[in-house]
Image (spheres, rainbow, N blue to C red):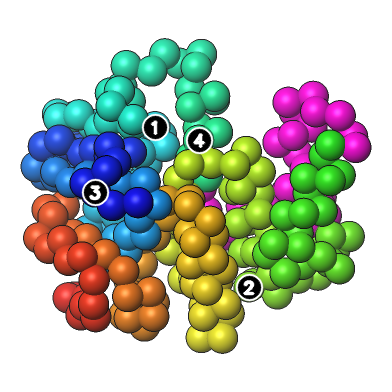
Amino acid sequence: MTKADSQPIVVFENVNKDYPGGTNALHGVSFSVFPGEFISLVGSSGAGKSTLLKLIYAEEEPTDGTVYFRGRPIKDIKRKVLPFYRRAIGTVFQDYKLLPQKTAFENIAYALEVDGRPAREIREEVTELLDIVGLGKKGHKFPRELSGGEQQRVAIARALIHHPQIICADEPTGNLDPVSTREITDLLLEINSYGTTVIIATHKNEVVDQLNKRVISLVDGRLVHDEARGKYLIKS
């Protein structure tokens, strides 16, 4: 799918985001994300990467400007509808955010249990996802029994449970060694190959180079570079 034959899935239109105390996290940010794209969102700590992702999955609202999803302003989505909207956005974090008292299988299944899905359907869905992320034989393990890379695989499987249109991954390899980093990056590329849009925030040059995808660079809350493909040096 190319930009010529698709409509943007996400659009930022002159977005500003201020926090109490005068902190300006984003300033005049505008760009579009098209279905099936893989975007590396780069910048140093405090550049605004996490804030940008939070605006997409509606954890924050812009101070000025508009963020659109499928042509609709996200800020117009009613609070009672937000949980349904967020099913279209899979989120992955640096610290995994797994429930320590639940096994890998149970962590992934939890969202479906809350929805009241039948046990057989849950078992089939979760088993398939564990296979996709390469943990088919480790569903019975608790997070403390898994490596960091394996925990992140569980988190990615959980993010896929509602078959989202977008995966927003905030520094998903930040706590991982080089081998695990490569494995997680390859997994996200595989997920993207199925048609899921992926936006990954990262400060690692090696991740950006490995991905070789579109790069959006933030510096002090401003979008300073939007490169379609190729290697890109993250400026400190």
Q: Is residue 51 above or below residue 44?
A: above
Q: Which residues are magenta?
A: 91-120
User: Residue 88 got which mark?
Assistant: 4
User: Which of the two residues, 54 or 35, is positioned nearer the viewer here?
Assistant: 35
CA distance separating discs 1 and 2: 27 Å
CA distance separating discs 3 and 2: 34 Å
Identify which amino acid the numbered label 2 is placed on. Gly
CA distance separating discs 4 and 3: 21 Å
Which residue is at 32% across, 75% downward?
A: 212
Which residue is at 21% across, 46% downward?
A: 4
Indicate the secondary structure of the residue bearing disc 1.
loop
Indicate the secondary structure of the residue bearing disc 4.
loop
Residue found at the far front of this picture: 5
Q: Is residue 220 visible?
A: no
Identify which amino acid the numbered label 1 is placed on. Ala
CA distance separating discs 1 and 4: 11 Å
Q: Going from the N terminus, do you reach mark 1 or mark 4 first? A: 1
Q: Residues within 10 Å of mark 3 (few under 14, many from 20)?
A: few
Indicate the secondary structure of the residue bearing disc 2.
helix
